[in-house]
């Protein structure tokens, strides 16, 4: 079985400050980890993924995520938040042998000017 | 570069009516997924097709739901008869790889309201 937990329903940050959106996972095999962003009335947009290799993964729009195997975490980060980053963020996991993505419940990010 | 195209974007209909949602995946993608998104349950996988063949339909809530993929460029999700609890946003997604690390690409969804 595989699952994802996003412990925060909402994260608030001031523009220009660093942001972190948390994600922990549980999977039986090697994890394939993804972050997606959803803007109002739009579908999910892929931001970045971890399959193997460097623990720090860089993605779209200046976002990055750090894979931590011992803590089974894959937190999303950005050094300097923009108001336009305000959206719903989803972490997802699947094991290497499967096809189904398990999504977290989502974290609403609000960046204030 | 066209993404996943879903139609209609919005659908409002009365309980008991048949509803058909449509999806055109990205050209060259061999995997197609239908999801449902609600506030209460989040994102749920309904059905997964690979090379136009349904592989896993365990997420389809009940017999009122059916999905087809007659060719590589078109899929439908049908609800008959529809009920108010079917109200949700339905997403279609496609990818090039069913078991590897390729991301799924999502359409903008169909917002379905059953009155």
Image (cartoon, rainbow, N blue to C red):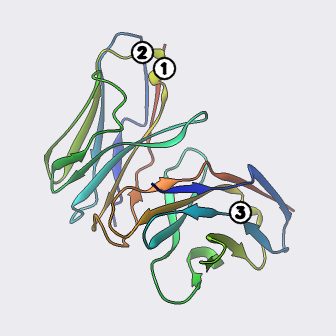
Q: The residue tagged with tag 2: helix, strand or loop?
A: loop
Q: The residue tagged with tag 1: helix, strand or loop?
A: helix
Q: Dot 3 surroundings within 10 Å: few (below 14), some, or many (20 or more)?
A: few
Query: Which residue has dot 3 on it?
Result: A84
**Measured along the vertical axis of the image, is residue B36 above or below residue B83?**
below
**Dot 1 and dot 3 within a common chain:** no
**Number of marks in picture:** 3
**Dot 2 and dot 3 within a common chain:** no
x and y percentages locating residue A63 in the rendered image: 64, 76
Left or right: where does residue B38 sit relative to residue B93?
right
**What is the number of the mark on residue B85?**
1
Q: A13 and B8: which one is in front?
A: A13
The subunit letter for the residue under badge 2 reads B
Instruction: Look at the image and tell me in which quarter the C terminus of chain A lies.
Output: bottom right
Instruction: Look at the image and tell me in which quarter the N terminus of chain A lies.
Output: bottom left
Q: The residue tagged with tag 3: helix, strand or loop?
A: helix
Q: CA distance from mark 2 to mark 3?
A: 37 Å
**Measured along the vertical axis of the image, is residue B53 above or below residue B86?**
below
**Where on the picture, by quarter, is residue B72?**
bottom left
**Dot 1 and dot 2 within a common chain:** yes
**Measured along the vertical axis of the image, is residue B80 above or below residue A61?**
above
Q: CA distance from mark 1 to mark 3?
A: 33 Å
**What is the number of the mark on residue B25?**
none
Tell me the residue at 29%/44% (across/down): B23
Left or right: where does residue B88 sit relative to residue A40?
left
Q: Are marks 2 and 3 in contact (CB under 8 Å)?
A: no
**What is the number of the mark on residue B83?**
2
Q: A11 and A30: which one is in front?
A: A30
Left or right: where does residue A111 sit relative to residue A89?
right
Q: Dot 2 surroundings within 10 Å: few (below 14), some, or many (20 or more)?
A: some
């Amino acid at each position: 079985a595989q699952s994802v937990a996003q412990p925060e329903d909402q994260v608030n940050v001031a523009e220009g400050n660093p942001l972190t959106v948390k994600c922990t996972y549980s999977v039986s095999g090697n994890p394939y980890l993804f972050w997606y962003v959803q803007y109002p009335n739009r579908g999910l947009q892929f931001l970045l993924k971890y399959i193997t290799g460097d623990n720090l993964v860089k993605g779209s729009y200046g976002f990055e995520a750090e894979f931590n195997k011992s803590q089974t975490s894959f937190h999303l980060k950005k050094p300097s938040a923009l108001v336009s980053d305000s959206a719903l963020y989803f972490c997802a996991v699947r094991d290497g042998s499967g096809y189904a993505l398990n999504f977290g419940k989502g974290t609403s990010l609000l960046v204030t000017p | 570069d066209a993404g996943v195209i879903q139609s209609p974007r919005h659908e409002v209909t009365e309980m008991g009516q048949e509803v058909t949602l449509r999806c055109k995946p990205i050209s060259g993608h061999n995997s197609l997924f239908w999801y449902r998104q609600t506030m209460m349950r989040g994102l749920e996988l309904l059905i997964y097709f690979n090379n136009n063949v349904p592989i896993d339909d365990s997420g389809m809530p009940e017999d009122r739901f059916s999905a087809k993929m007659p060719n590589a460029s078109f899929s439908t999700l049908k609800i008959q008869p529809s009920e108010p609890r079917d109200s949700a946003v339905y997403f279609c997604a496609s990818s090039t790889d069913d078991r590897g690390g390729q991301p799924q690409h999502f359409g903008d969804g169909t917002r379905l309201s059953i009155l």
